[in-house]
Image (cartoon, rainbow, N blue to C red):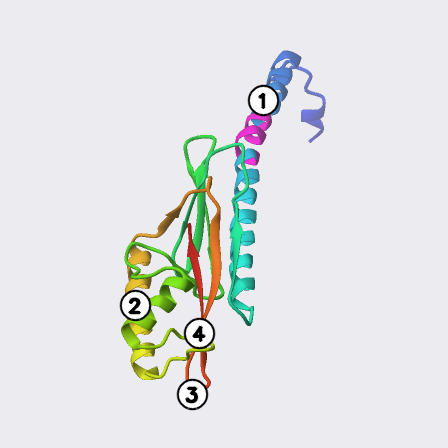
Amino acid sequence: MSRFIRDNNGVMGLTLSQIGLMIAMGILIAAVFSLVFQNDWRKEAELQNIATSFSTMVEGMDSRFFENTTGFLFPDMECHYNVSVSTEYITVSTEGNVGNDLSVKERFLIKPWPNSNESTWGTGATLHDYLKDNFGNSGNMSDPIQNVGNVKNYLNNEWENVSGSLALKPLYISIDEIIYIEKACIYYEDGGKQGIVFIYQ
C-alpha cells in the first residue's frame, strides 16, 4: 500500500474547467427538469382540484332531501382544459409542456344522470312531464306514481341505456358555460321516494 502513496507520477484526470463544466451542466439539467416536470405536476394538481370540486358538489346535491338546482362554473387556468362526465367518472385533461397528455379521472360516489343525446329527458321538470304524459302521474309529492312497478322498470332501463352510452362516449362539457346540477325526486304512492341527480348545460 505504501508503494501507491509514494507514487507521485499520477496525472490529475479532471481539470478545474472540466469540473466547472460538469457543475454547470448539472444546474442546467436541474433547471430544465424543474421547468418542464414541476410545471406539469402543478397542472395535474389543478386538474385534480377541479375534478374534486365538481364531484363534491354532485355528491352534496345527492344528500339533499328536496328538489334543488345549483350551478357550477369551471375555473380559469393558464391553459385550456377539457372536461367530460359519465355516470361513473369526471375526467379533466389538458396538454403537458412536452406535448404529453395530462388527465385526472375521479369516480363519483353516487351515480349522476348526465343529460346526453340518449336521454328522453334530462331535467327534473321534463322527467315529471314525461311521467305525467306516459304513466298518468307526475311523481311529485302531490301527484305520486301509482303504477310503481312499470315506472321503476322504465327508469332502470333508461339508466342502463344512458350509462352504457356514456361509458363508450362520455358527455363533453363546455367549460365556458355554467353546468347545472339538479336533484329531482320521484314520489311513489306506496311511500317510496327515488332521487336522481341530473347534470346538464
Residue 8 vs 96, above or below: the answer is: above
Question: Considering only order in the chain, which callout, 4 or 3, is on the residue closer to the N terminus?
Answer: 4
Which numbered mark, 3 or 2, is in the foreground of this view?
Answer: 3
The answer to the question of whether label 1 and label 2 lie on touching residues, with beta carbons closer than 8 A, is no
- Residue type at the position of mark 4: Asn
Of badges 1 and 4, nearer the viewer stands 4
What is the distance, in whole Å, between disc 1 and disc 2 at their CAs? 58 Å
Whole-number angstrom distance, CA of label 3 to CA of label 2: 22 Å
Q: Earlier in the sequence, mark 1 or mark 4?
A: 1
Q: Are marks 1 and 4 in contact (CB under 8 Å)?
A: no
Disc 1 marks a residue whose amino acid type is: Leu
- Decide: few, some or many residues near mark 2? Use Cα within 10 Å; few <14, some 14-19, many ≥20: some
Provide the residue span drawn in magenta. Answer: 30-38
Does the stretch in magenta take in 36? yes
Query: What amino acid is found at the position of numbered circle 3 in the picture?
Result: Asp
Identify which residue, 37 or 118, lies in the foreground: 118
Residue 158: numbered disc: 2
Q: Earlier in the sequence, mark 3 or mark 2?
A: 2
